């Protein structure tokens, strides 16, 4: 039996799981983590090691040879995904992207992209999940439903002996709002308008409509249109919220996908970070996106950039938007894609998915995931943290060790990527 296991499957990377191995099958003992339980069932039901080429079964070496041929003939290959994978797999993906002169991206949604853009512009006052659980006396959850998306974290937060006040701000009731101390519902309000109004209330400034510029909120000028002004009832609620934020001992604002929805999520999150910065002048306040484990940390210390990295002959270059996976696919600028785990496909737009259906694709699919995507070449691979040891970065940027629990004949992601890279190099040297 294995205790204190870190799960690579759930969004909050639960680190207190107990698993047992019985007759080559994994059994989740406690506590119950829905995402881990579902992934373990897939692992237990996985068929023998398999690979496919154009929908037909083949051996893993044949799949590697075919994948290398696709990358060798590609003008601008794209590698993306890596969510929930260990740093060894992510490092191998960076190495292959550099070998083929391609682009590598984490393919996160607006939450990850916007948070990174805001961090680079204004910085942020951040914290770990441990600080939220043990130090915060007030937690504001904005545009998120962690009771569903981060169930174990929310469960531990509500049952913590520290017992922080939990406030929820959203446009509709949810499982999280039902368990909160107080629920603030703004059905038709714009998050930027709410943030700007909160900042005016914190400063005790006269309330007036304002607009958002690219870098800082500014008063209305001639020709500008207001983004909306809170109603009288909304202003009353915002005054209550402002008072509670100012008078807490240590507060944390957790924001999610709905908070970062819409156009230019980076500007919305930047306004939140500026609000937190002002609150730090009167109390202690932090902000943290309720995201999921990604490859931003690995990319940052391998290439110097956290997202959307293009390998030129002169070295890596990053332009978020220009080299982002979703946007490149929408503009049909890549002619071959390596998908590192199908879970990343849910972040792509319909236009990007349409392009992906037209070009050659290579899918490395951990047996804990399942997809019906018809990749040109598909290889079933082992799971980091189940079949091999590794390290994973939790969404609060804390690195956690992954242990090998179950022996397997499945190749790892790093092994397959290294084999593909060797085949590409050999083909080029022979050519």
Image (cartoon, rainbow, N blue to C red):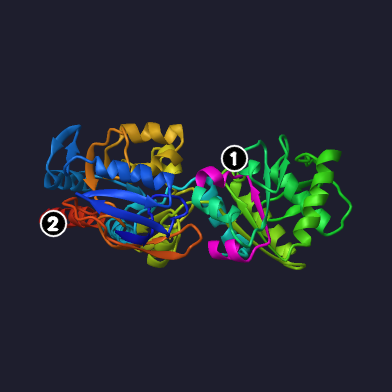
Q: Classify mark 1: residues with Cα within 10 Å, few (<14), some (14-19) or many (20+).
A: few
Q: Position of residue 337 (x, y in %)?
A: 31, 43
In the depicted structure, whether residue 137 falls above or below residue 213: below
Question: Is 142 colored magenta in this rendering?
Answer: yes
- Specify which label sits upstream in the sequence, 1 or 2: 1
Segment tinted magenta in the rendering: 128-150
- Could you tell me which quadrant the N terminus lies in? bottom left
Q: Position of residue 166 (x, y in %)?
A: 67, 52
Which SS class for mark 2?
Answer: helix
What is the quadrant of residue 393 in the picture? bottom left
Which SS class for mark 1?
Answer: helix
Q: Is residue 93 left or right of residue 34?
A: left
Q: Classify mark 2: residues with Cα within 10 Å, few (<14), some (14-19) or many (20+).
A: few
Q: Position of residue 184 (x, y in %)?
A: 73, 43
On residue 426, the disc is 2
Q: Is residue 166 left or right of residue 289?
A: right
In front here: 152 or 237? 152
Q: Residue at x 46, y 50 (%)?
A: 11
Question: Is 293 colored magenta in this rendering?
Answer: no
In the image, farthest residue toward the right = 206
Q: Residue at x 37, y 54 (%)?
A: 8
In front here: 359 or 253? 253
Q: Nearer the viewer, mark 1 or mark 2?
A: 1
Q: Residue at x 44, y 32 (%)?
A: 351
> How far separated are the C-alphas under marks 1 and 2?
55 Å
Residue 367 visible from this viewpoint: no
List the residue tagged with mark 1: 175
In the depicted structure, whether residue 313 falls above or below residue 173: below
In the depicted structure, whether residue 394 falls above or below residue 32: below
Q: Is residue 219 left or right of residue 39?
A: right
Residue 256 visible from this viewpoint: yes
Q: Is residue 117 left or right of residue 173?
A: left
């Amino acid at each position: 039996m294995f205790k204190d296991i870190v799960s690579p499957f759930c969004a909050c990377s639960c680190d207190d799981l107990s698993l047992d191995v019985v007759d080559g099958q994994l059994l989740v003992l406690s506590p119950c983590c829905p995402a881990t339980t579902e992934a373990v069932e897939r692992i237990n039901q996985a068929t023998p090691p398999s690979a496919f080429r154009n929908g037909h079964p083949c051996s893993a070496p044949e799949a590697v040879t075919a994948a290398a041929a696709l990358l060798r003939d590609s003008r601008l290959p794209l590698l993306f995904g890596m969510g929930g994978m260990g740093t060894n797999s992510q490092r191998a993906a960076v190495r292959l992207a550099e070998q083929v002169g391609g682009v590598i991206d984490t393919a996160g949604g607006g939450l990850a992209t916007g948070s990174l853009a805001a961090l680079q512009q204004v910085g942020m006052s951040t914290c770990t999940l441990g600080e939220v659980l043990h130090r915060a006396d007030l937690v504001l959850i904005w545009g998120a439903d962690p009771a569903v998306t981060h169930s174990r974290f929310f469960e531990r937060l509500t049952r913590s002996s520290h017992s922080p006040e939990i406030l929820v701000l959203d446009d509709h009731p949810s499982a999280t709002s039902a368990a909160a101390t107080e629920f603030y519902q703004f059905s038709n309000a714009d998050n930027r308008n709410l943030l700007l109004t909160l900042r005016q209330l914190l400063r005790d400034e006269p309330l007036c409509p304002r607009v958002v510029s690219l870098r800082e909120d500014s008063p209305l000028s001639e020709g500008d249109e207001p983004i909306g002004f809170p109603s009288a009832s909304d202003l009353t609620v915002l005054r209550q919220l402002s008072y509670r934020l100012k008078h807490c001992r240590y507060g944390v604002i957790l924001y999610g996908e709905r908070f970062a929805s819409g156009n230019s999520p980076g500007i919305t999150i930047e306004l939140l970070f500026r609000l937190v910065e002002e609150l730090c002048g009167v109390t202690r306040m932090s902000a943290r996106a309720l995201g999921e484990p990604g490859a931003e940390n690995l990319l940052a210390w391998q290439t110097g950039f956290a997202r959307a990295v293009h390998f030129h002959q002169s070295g890596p270059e990053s332009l978020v938007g220009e080299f982002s996976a979703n946007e490149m696919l929408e503009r049909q600028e890549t002619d071959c894609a390596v998908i590192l785990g199908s879970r990343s496909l849910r972040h792509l737009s319909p236009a990007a998915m349409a392009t992906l259906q037209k070009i050659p694709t290579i899918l490395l699919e951990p047996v804990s995931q399942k997809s019906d995507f018809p990749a040109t070449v598909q290889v079933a691979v082992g799971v980091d943290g189940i079949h091999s040891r590794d390290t994973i970065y939790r969404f609060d940027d804390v690195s956690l060790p992954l242990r090998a629990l179950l022996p397997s004949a499945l190749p790892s992601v790093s092994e397959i990527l290294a084999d593909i890279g060797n085949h590409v190099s050999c083909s080029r040297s022979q050519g």
